[in-house]
Amino acid sequence: MKVNIETKFTECTAHAPASTANLGPGYDVFGLGLDALEDIVTVKINKSPKTIKNNLKIITKGHGKKNIPNDPDYNTSGIVARKIISDYNLHNYRCLIEIEKNIPVGYGMGSSAASAVATAISFNSLFGLEMDENKLLDYSAEGELASAGVKHYDNIAASLFGNFVVVKTYPRLEFIKIKAPKDLIVVICVPQIKVPNMKTEVSRKIIPRKVNLEKTVHNIANACSIVAGFCNQDINMICNGINDCIVEPVRKKMIPGYDELKKRSMEEGAMAFTISGAGPSSIAFSNSRKKSLHLAEVMREEYKKLDIKCETFLNRPSNGSKIVSKK
Ligand code: HSE
């Protein structure tokens, strides 16, 4: 790709939020940005030692640091950076990427997507690449290859744009952004269980390849209710649609105590409950802070019964990724 690159900047920092994908029936289609946690990525050019391999180096810090590789070939940000460097012919720059990993890695909170998005927008801004939103989405999605083995766009779109996003990939990549109701609260519960390497890839493989028409009709109807609910800013309508008879029944087997957790949460006031992305985190939906705090407590209690530690986070819809400094 031929672009005139003249950058007077040497450093750019971006934040990108966590997200939840699918929202029940919207497998690979729906994403919602969550505001409780975000990854922070700083890209520095020509500041690292002259000897770095292939002119790209990654440094990680933050809680999730030990759970992600530093080798750019296997790191979400590294894969995104390599693709941009190659397509925009930036090989002559020495790039150092510092990742502050705050979103739990491999727990269904769009952790890989957040780092990928923050990397893509940093490169775009630093080098003045003038990517449009579709390009940013597509380059960021390269990073999902590291955890899912395929490019899926739902977490990426939610982290990049924030709020609620519908992603279409057929016949071409397109997205629809819809503002989420400001009173919507998503309680996310992250169990401290061991997750397989490449968890998203593993949990995608167990989903049936063929689905019967009746179940497809149910899921489409529910998905439509969710979209209509976001368009109408109607939390009840959104939550009525969060029912999935295709993916949840198989994936819940990877989550200890899921049925009981869902039953209790619904009895205790959740307006809807489902798996967050590929799990093992679960999400409960609510419209009040008081109810949400109670739900978080209920979820922690349920895991305590199973002797499993868990963390809970209350989220409002996020406004998406942003560049926070450039110098
Ligand atoms: N749509 C993806 C999946 C989201 O369910 O595999 C992964 O977070």
Image (cartoon, helix red, strand yellow):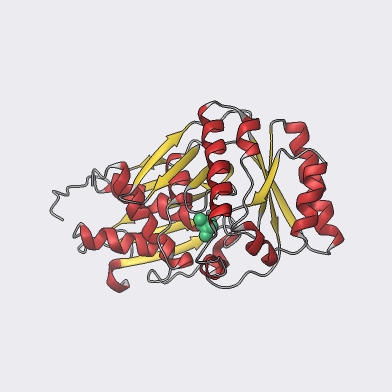
Residue 69, horizontal then vertical, whole percent: 48, 70
Q: Quadrant of residue 115?
A: bottom left
Question: Residue 228: where, in percent of width, then height?
Answer: 53, 32
Nearest the viewer among 100 and 163 is 163
Would residue 11 be visible to someone looking at this image?
Answer: no
Image position of 55 (left or right of 140): left
Query: Is 11 rendered above or below residue 79?
Result: above
Residue 319 relative to residue 262: left or right: left
Residue 319 place in picture, x, y as percent:
49, 35
Q: In front here: 58 or 176?
A: 176
Q: Position of residue 68 (x, y in %)?
A: 51, 67
Q: Is residue 292 visible?
A: yes
Quarter of the image where the N terminus is located? bottom left
Instruction: Specify the quadrant that holds the C terminus.
Output: top left
Q: For the point 37% across and 66% down, which residue is it?
A: 57
Q: Nearer the viewer, residue 290 or 63?
A: 290
Give the residue at x 45% y 42%. 166
Q: Is residue 293 left or right of residue 109?
A: right
Q: Quadrant of residue 294?
A: top right
